[in-house]
Amino acid sequence: MRGIYQITNKINGKKYIGSSINVFKRWKQHVTDLHYGLHHSHLLQKDRDKYSLNDFTFEILEYVENKNDLLTIEQMWLDGEDINGLYNVSSSTTMHNISAPSDFVEDVFYCKKLSEETQQLLRKNLMIHKKRGKLLHSGKFKYDYSKTWFSKNTKDVQQLKLNMNNYFYNQTSSMSKERCWTTFTQYARQLEFKGNKKRFVPLNGQVLKEKKSYLCFAANCFPNSFLIAKYKELSSLDENTYALSLILKWIVNCGNINKPLIIFIPSIRMEELLSEWLKNG
């Protein structure tokens, strides 16, 4: 069973996020390594020795159909996590010496590899929704709507939900079948409202058969330093390239770029990145 999993220390809240083509077999391997003091994460091993295995929980965060998507989706779960709250580590001897899967590298550098035809269609047909009313006062700071922001701003998440509702129902008057939206998977349920639950498309960008005309990208994406340090192909990856790649790929996979297309981006940072890219074609 392929998927993304998480091991959490119930005492201090620290966690280990990983992916595997067989999550239950991988969990058993973690348990065995920890029991014999052989775990590759010395931080996790140290806390296992300090506490007991009963002080740790194991959960599946997301099931993944295509094994080639595992690393990309794992990165999305790691995005924005405080490195000090993670057990994920790379030893100094393996830094930048491991090759990342080619599909993952293509995803994170997607904005640099778009075909000329796709670029022209996006610049011709894609329009960023101009914020007005209450939407003007949202997402002004760099880390607004990042994964860390979602975990610390429950009240503001509800306001974001209202803003999305306002955009879809009042400021565009779009029909349900014309819409789709995204955010970090673990926070999607907090943004669901009547009429949009089935319109959620994860950040890893399933290619929709019926492309949409009204989009909402309710996420502010930052790469995780752990994976950048681990893979040599990512040594040149900066946070803006990563963020722009994610939003462009999601738009192409979900939106009908052959016709006029509107997107609402709550995050000022993400909006400015896309706006700058559209202007500089």
Image: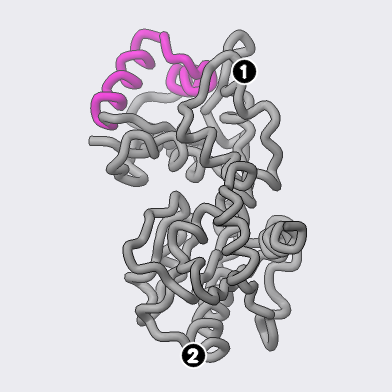
Above or below residue 6? Residue 265 is: below
Helix, strand or loop under label 2: loop
For the residue marked with disc 1, what is the amino acid?
His
| Principal secondary structure, stretch drawn in magenta | helix
Residue 63 in percent (x, y) is at 30, 44
> Quadrant of the rendered structure where residue 233 is?
top right
Residue 155 in percent (x, y) is at 57, 71
Return the residue at label 1: 96
206 displayed left or right of 156: left
For the residue marked with disc 2, what is the amino acid?
Ser
The stretch drawn in magenta includes residue 148: no
Q: What residue is rendered at 57% in x and 79% in y?
A: 163
The stretch drawn in magenta includes residue 47: yes
Dots 2, 1 in contact, CB < 8 A:
no
Above or below residue 211? Residue 18 is: above
Q: Quadrant of the C terminus?
A: bottom right
The 10 Å Cα crowd at callout 1, few under 14, some 14 to 19, many 20 or more, is some
Q: What residue is rendered at 36% in x and 37% in y?
A: 5
In this picture, which residue range is highlighted in magenta? 23-50
